[in-house]
Amino acid sequence: MELIPGISTEHYIFLSVVLFCIGAFGVMYRKNAIIVFMCIELMLNAVNLLLVAFSRQWNGADAQVFVFFVMAVAAAEVAVGLAILMMIYRNTGTTDINVLNKLKG
């Protein structure tokens, strides 16, 4: 079953894989903590897209409900993560994640 005529589930799988890879490379190679948070969110959204596509293909709403909870947890993660990042910025003056080694002790 196609979500939109002319666009099959394989297209959604390909888009999801591309988005997840962009997010994974961003997490591995970027040094700015805000960019790392954005890349983690991109990876979560790629998985959510895949879950919704498969849910629609199999005519079930279970995965769509799960996506709702994943988005709620991701929003809470960002709120806590940005609060921690603000405290780190106040103490160090930068959002570079390599500077966090100085906070060990």
Image (tube, rainbow, N blue to C red):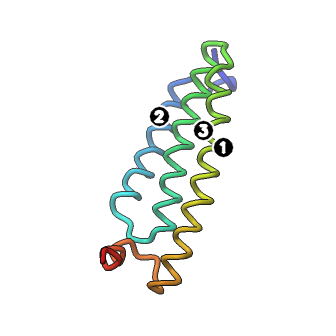
| Disc 2 packing (10 Å; few <14; some 14–19; many ≥20) | few
Is the Cβ of the residue at disc 3 closer than 8 Å to that at disc 1?
A: yes
Q: Quadrant of the C terminus?
A: bottom left
- Measure the alpha-carbon separation of dots 3 and 1: 5 Å
Where does residue 78 sit, x and y in percent of width and height? 59, 57
Which residue corresponds to mark 1?
A: 72
Identify the secondary structure beneath mark 1. Answer: helix
Amino acid of disc 2: Phe
In front of the other: 11 or 86: 86
Where does residue 15 sit, x and y in percent of width and height? 51, 38
Which residue corresponds to mark 2?
A: 14
Label 2 vs label 3, nearer the camera: 3
Q: Is residue 90 above or below residue 25?
A: below
Identify the secondary structure beneath mark 3. Answer: helix
Label 1 vs label 2, nearer the camera: 1
Q: Earlier in the sequence, mark 2 or mark 3?
A: 2
Q: Residue at x 49, y 65 (%)?
A: 35
Where does residue 97 sit, x and y in percent of width and height? 38, 71
Q: Earlier in the sequence, mark 1 or mark 2?
A: 2
Q: Is residue 31 left or right of residue 82?
A: left
Q: Residue at x 54, y 61 (%)?
A: 81
Amino acid of disc 3: Val
Q: Residue at x 55, y 23 (%)?
A: 9
Image mark for residue 70: 3
| Disc 3 packing (10 Å; few <14; some 14–19; many ≥20) | some
- Measure the alpha-carbon separation of dots 2 and 3: 21 Å
